[in-house]
Amino acid sequence: MKHWRDQLRPAPGGDSTAWRCFHGTGSRWGGVWIDDFDGRWLVQTETAHFPESFREAVDLGDARSLYWKPRDKGAKTAPEWVAGEKVTEPFLVRENGLAFRIDFEAGYSQGIFLDQRENRRRVRDRVRPGDRVLNTFAYTCAFSLAAAVGGAITSSLDLSRPYLDWGKRNLEANGIDPADHYFCKGDVFEWLATFRRQGRNFHGVILDPPTFSRNGKGQVFKADRDYADLVSLACGVVETGGWLLCTGNTHRLDQRDFEKAVRQGVRAAGRRANDLEACPMPPEFNGDDYLKTVWVEVGGM
Ligand SMILES: C[S@@+](CC[C@H](N)C(=O)[O-])C[C@H]1O[C@@H](n2cnc3c(N)ncnc32)[C@H](O)[C@@H]1O
């Protein structure tokens, strides 16, 4: 039986110190995923047990800290310390030259979704100075940072004020003044309707919703079921010739169904999907392609 070290993935390059370093496959390592945050390893497992053979990672010099959390969406607990240095303060990692603030004590999510690395790079490459970009479900504003570095004026929407504040710290960590950008707390669906009523529009809109969400009024959004409706609402605030980045963890939709939902949403808004481009996940995520990504250029009515 091969050692787990044989499946370790090197850093992706491009000045990145955070990446998925282990995406287990096969009967022995399937259901084990490890994210490397500048030497601090976060092991995630499908089962409720820490896989003991990884404990040696600190002694072997692969990791300086070892933390673990089971992938139990219901539990939502912070990762547990296993070995090595304890991480008691937020710290910075780099991805394609940008700094992101990570916190192992912040709860279930540590501040960045590493599977969106390539999409952040694409956003940064696509924006032009002065573009207005709306980042919905912004979380810690990682997409806003990518757009801001490209010269865009960003608006970030999220239900959570603490996450938006975290986003401001992310901009500051990269020498960007948050006062030059907008941060809106509240429900994405309500904000999209409000912006549309106000005639406020954007050159680019980023849609990266959670798989499931319930807003303050108890309204439920399921990405698998409601993605087309979200796209349709977003089309109400995209200028002609602007773009939508549609992405999300939609396990139950395959790439074709996802693209269909996006087209449906654009059509339902009375707009045209001029150019549609599907993008793959980063290569080290070599499991099932759960993360779907489609860019659309939105034409006129
Ligand atoms: C999976 S994260 C989104 C990841 C994010 N797009 C990124 O790039 O890191 C989900 C985020 O959506 C926010 N959220 C969930 N439902 C929402 C809603 N109805 N309106 C606004 N924000 C919402 C949560 O507060 C959380 O920050």
Image (cartoon, rainbow, N blue to C red):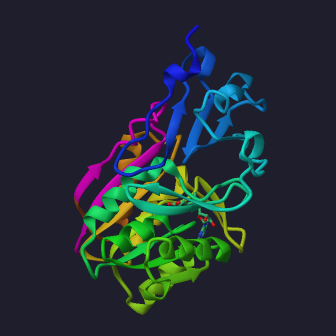
- Number of marks drawn: 0
> Does 24 appear above or below 199?
above
Say whether residue 269 is visible. Answer: no
Q: Which residue lies furthest to the bottom in this view?
A: 198
At x 35%, y 42%, the residue is: 280
Does residue 157 appear left or right of residue 13 in this picture? right
Q: Can residue 208 be seen in this view?
A: yes
Q: Which of 16 and 22 is in front in this view?
A: 16
Q: What stretch is highlighted in magenta?
A: 275-301
Q: Among all residues in the image, which is located at the extreme top?
A: 1
Residue 291 x/y as whole percent: 46, 45
Examine the structure image and report whether residue 174 is included in the region drawn in magenta: no
> Is 292 included in the stretch rendered in magenta?
yes
Which quadrant holds residue 33?
A: top right
Q: Residue at x 75, y 52 (%)?
A: 78
Give the quarter of the image for residue 236. Answer: bottom left
Q: Quadrant of the N terminus?
A: top right
Where in the figure is residue 31, as x and y percent of width and height?
A: 63, 28
Above or below: residue 216 compared with residue 53: below
* Closer to the camera in the image, 122 or 89: 89
Up the image or down, 265 lies above or below 66; here it is below
**Who is closer to the viewer here, 130 or 229?**
130
Picture coordinates of residue 111 (x, y %)?
Answer: 59, 59
For the residue pair 269 and 195, the one nearer the viewer reads as 195
Q: Quadrant of residue 57?
A: top right
Tell me where residue 257 appears, x and y as whole percent. Answer: 40, 44
* Quadrant in which the C terminus appears: bottom left
**Residue drawn at point x = 45 percent, y = 52 percent:** 116
Tell which quarter ligand 1 is in: bottom right
